[in-house]
Structure formats: structure tokens, C-alpha cells
Amino acid sequence: TELTQGGNVSFLYGNDNYMKATASYSTGMMNDKFGVSVLLTHWQGDGWAEGAEGQGQNYFISAGLKANDQHSFNFLLTGAPQYHDQNFTKSISSHFNNPDDPDDFNIKYNGNWGTLDGEYLSLRRNYYHKPVANLNWDFSINEKSKLSTVLYASWGRGGGTGDRGDRDNRFFTDDGYYDWDMIQAANIADAGSEEYIIRASVNNHSWYGAVTNYETALTENINWSLGADLRTYRGSHFRQVVDLLGAPAFSQFPSARFPDGREVTATFEANPWKAVSNFADIDEQIHYSNDETISYGGVFSQLEYIDDKWSAFVQGAISNQSHIRYEIRNELEADEESEKVTNGGFNVKTGASYSPDENNTIFFNTGFYSRQPFHDNIYLNFSNFVNPVTENEDIFGLEAGYKYANQRFAGNINVYRSSWKNRTTTRTLDPGDVLPNGDTLATDGYRNTKQNQLHSGLELDFGYKINSKFKLKGYASFGNWTYEGTIDQDFFNEDRDLILSQSGDDVDGIEVGGAPQTSFGLGVDWKLVQGLSLDVDYNYYDRLYSNIGVSTESLELPSFGLLDLGLAYVINLDNGQLLTLRGNVYNLTGEEYISRAFTGIAPDANDNNNWNGVNRDNRVSFGKTTTWNVSARFSF
């Protein structure tokens, strides 16, 4: 809760009809006892890419009570319901209307949508609402000691949509978009025998927990803290029908719980507000249905030393997790509960810094984290069978650096090395992905990968205040992130059936993708006249590699640089009120670039089959070309 009274309202408008309105107000601490802060936001837009519209809200309500000099309480409720239609990775070639014409290129192409009866309809919508409630209690025991406790709960509801059913009833327009009218006509003509529908994969969860932390000053220079973290989680994962697209029902295949199958007619809107309470029960769920409970308990502690020149700390934590899986659809009710699996974990970290004077500081940190495996890796192949070889993920890190600061200049430089063993990741696969055995995936799918990674590098940043009106800033990052040894991969279809297991693929020394390993930037903040300021930033990205996909090869993507520009004008009004006007342009030069790639297909010998040197068969995501926004903010 804000301690001072005041508020603001703002409105922002940007490219592709993006709009955002925000209002906030705080009462301040009334009579030094009670205060309330509220923030409300609404946003909507068509999205930079085709078929990527979205809408959402944000609410934040905080109420604080200072009962006396020792006890204060704060209640907080916040949430951000939203939906956004998705633009998945796709082959570069799909962005060409005419593959023989290099200029006939649509960087914003997204084939996940079409029109039904003249109305926009997307196949791929992510929607979610996760309200979070906290109750904080701060207890000032005495001048040396205090106790902080928070009780929290969150309720996540929502999921993501896709297709299901007979893909022979899936039709596209000549320019590569869903022909929903033809799909609906085919469903009606088949009278439910070969239906093709839109479904939602739902992930509902409920979290409840408590964290408490006791801090005390043992001496003038030594502080000690001790805390506990307790949580429990229940998750439900299933699919439900969103739109039958003209079919009378969706035919659900037999299972242990429903040996005769079912005809499902209930539909549920992919709406984040309605998802809180309106979702399918077991009789209306399709394809899969499983729940899980996870219980977690841990304790943590830190000892810290601080004087005029030195600071040092050592901290550690131990925890225990228990997992139970419930296979609802494919087991009889009496057999749905799995074996309970319990795993321990811990982390320890220590570090120190030395400041010989007020301008210079050197520091060093190191730590080790043994993290329990994720739930889906404990149970084999989306079943209740326990994986007997599940291991904790082990993360070991080292960091050292130097800081310098005076009235005009501040700079930091640090080096790091992190080793991540037994890391397991899960990624969705798209229809058309080619598996390592040469088979082509006909449906959506999943890939679990067990891997080892080694990250090392150097980072630096600085800010230099040339004078009262001009500031120069910059950064650079040089990384060396590689896989170590071999990886194990399991591939699943959309029904979560294991279709391929591959072990021992050599990836030693292959670069880790997903983020640039080399980047640097330079920027200026310039106060042109009273109230008017300009900021310019240039960022350059290099050594960006594709993620290891269904193949074990990575591909270095083209480097790119982005120029951003901002202009702001602040008007001082009466009684301390402010009006701030601002405009931003991102990627001012309209640079076309690949931001991510999930395949590593080598360039073709015929350059006409490449885009900027990258084989057109690669599945990629393009970064945004020029975008902009303007805003006004009134503070009172």
C-alpha cells in the first residue's frame, strides 16, 4: 500500500490498434493507520502479426493496516486476465505467397486464423486468469529483531486452443488461411461421423502456502535470518470442446473410465473471465484428464556480515517435495491414484564484497542448487508409472566482478560460469516437424529432452553523465553457452502417446540457442529543453543460434541491430500535478530479422531456397518490424 496520497490516469495508443488505459489511486496512510491502493488497467490490440489479436485487464487492490508500532498488516489481491491469439513458428517458405518471387514476402503471415460467417476466428488462443491473494503480517519484535509472514493463495484457470478430429475436414484458402466456412459445411454434411473441432487444453491449478522469515541483529555487524516455506498445489489437466464447428457432437473414443465412449456436446468459451468457474467436468472432458498434488516444505537461513569495507554472506535451504498423480480418464476410479513420490533438494550460496573506498567494489559469489525434478518427469510418459531413474537437476555457479562509481560515472564488469546438469525441458511440436527417424509428425506433439549445459561469459555496463543535460549509457555481453555430452529425447503425439525414444545423441560443444550469446548496446538520454527529453538506444545481437529441435544440430542465425527512439515532454501543472506526453518508435529502420528458430537445417546450395542465408525450410519466428506508441499520463 502506498504511503502517500495520489494517483494517475494514462492512455496509450500504438501500432495495430493497440490501446491501453490505466487508472490508479492511493489514499495514503490515513491517520497513520490505514490505507488503500487500487490500480486498474485495460488493454487490447490486433497484434503485430496477422491473427494475433488480444485483450486483457489488470487489477491490483492493496489495503494496509498499522495496528500499532509493532504490528502491521497488508492484504493484496491482484490478477491479469488475458487472451491472445498465437503466431507459432513456421517455415520461412510459408511466408512467401510466390516461392519464386523473393519480393513476395509477408513477414507478418500467420496461418492460424480465418473467417467464419464473415467473423474473425483463430485456431490458437491462449487464455488465462490467475488471481493471487496475499495477507502479510510484519511484526517488529524489538529494535534488533523482526518477523515477516505471508499467507498466499492463487487460482489459475485457462488454457490454450487447437484442433482435434478428422483432419480430412480441415480446409484452407488459396492464400494459406483456415477456411472455416468450408470446414463447418463438411462437419454438417458428415453429420458427426468425421467431425473436426476446436478444443482447449486446460491447465487449472490452486496454490496455497505460507512463508515466514525471522531476522535479528546478532551484533552491530552480523545479521541472521531463519525462515520456513510451506505450500500445497493441486493441478487439473484435461481437454474440452470450444467449438463444434457445425458438428452435432464430438465422438470421444473409449477409455477405462468410459468403455463405451461418449458423444460430447458441451462447449466452453476460451474466455479468461469465464474460465474461473466455467469448465468441463469429467463427463464432458475429452482425450486426456489427469490431476496432480504437490506438497512442498522447506527451511532457509542466512548469515550476513557488513562493515564499512567488507560484506559477506552464507545462505542455505533444504526442502522436500511429494508428488501424487491421478490418471482419471485411462484408469478406473479405484485405481486412479499413483504411488506417492518424495524428493529432497537443497541449495547453498556464499559471497563477499570489498570496498576499499567509496568508489570501488570487488565481489565474488558462488552457489550450488540441487533442484527436484518437475512433476511430468517423475511419472513416465504421462502415466502413473514412476520413472525409476529420475534425478535432481544440479546447478553450480561462479560469479566475480568489479564496480566503480563516482558522481558522473558508474560501471560494472563481471564474469560468470554456470553448469547445469540433468536439465529436462519440454517443448511442443507442430504438425510437419520431422522426427529423428525421418517420420513426419501429423499432429501437435511434445518433446522431452534431458541435457547438460555449460554457460560462461563476461558482462559489462556503464553510465556516464557528461553534463546536466546529456547522459551516455551502454553495455556488452559475451557468452559461451554450449551443451555437454549427450542428450536423451522422448517424443509424444497429441494424445501423449510415446511415439519415439532416442538416447545418446551427441551434442557436445553445440551452442545453446534461444538468446544471443553476444550483444552490445549504446544509448543517450538528452534533455533538450526544460521538460523535453530525447532517448536513443541501439542494440546489436550476434551469435544467436537455433534451439536444438527434432534434430541435434544448431544453426547460427543472421546478426541484427535495432534502433529505438523515445521523446517525452513533462508539463508541471498546479498543486504538484504533472502531465507527461511520450512517444516511442521501436526498430526505427524496419530491420527484418529472425528472433528464434527451432530447426537447424543447413543453407541450401541454391541461394534462391534461402532467406538471408537461412534455409527456407527452417521453422522460425520473425522479430517485429517498426512499431510505435504514444501516451499521455496525468499524475495528481
Image (cartoon, helix red, strand yellow):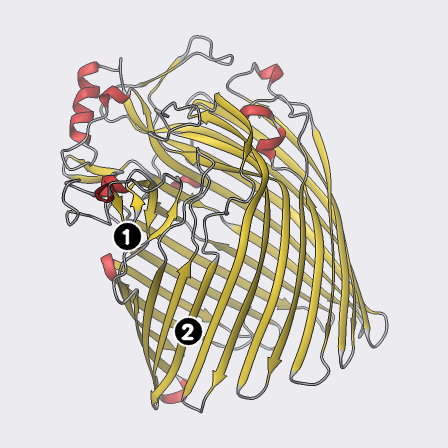
Q: Which residue is drawn at 19% across and 25% down?
A: 184
Q: Which of 478 and 191 is in front in this view?
A: 478
Callout count: 2
Q: Do the residues labelled 2 and 1 touch (CB within 8 Å)?
A: no
Quarter residue 424 falls in: top right
Q: Which of 68 and 363 is in front in this view?
A: 363
Circle on res. 522: 2
Give the mark, 2 or 1, whose residue is nearer the N terminus: 1
The residue singled out by tag 1 in the image is: 47
Q: Which residue lies furthest to the front in this view?
A: 605
Q: Nearer the viewer, mark 2 or mark 1?
A: 2
Against 528, is 201 above or below? Answer: above
Q: Where is residue 175 in the image (x, y as percent from the top left)?
A: 15, 37
Confirm whether residue 29 shows in the render. Answer: no
Which amino acid, mark 2? Leu
Q: Which residue is drawn at 15% across and 34% down?
A: 117
Which amino acid, mark 1? Gly
* Element assignment for label 2: strand
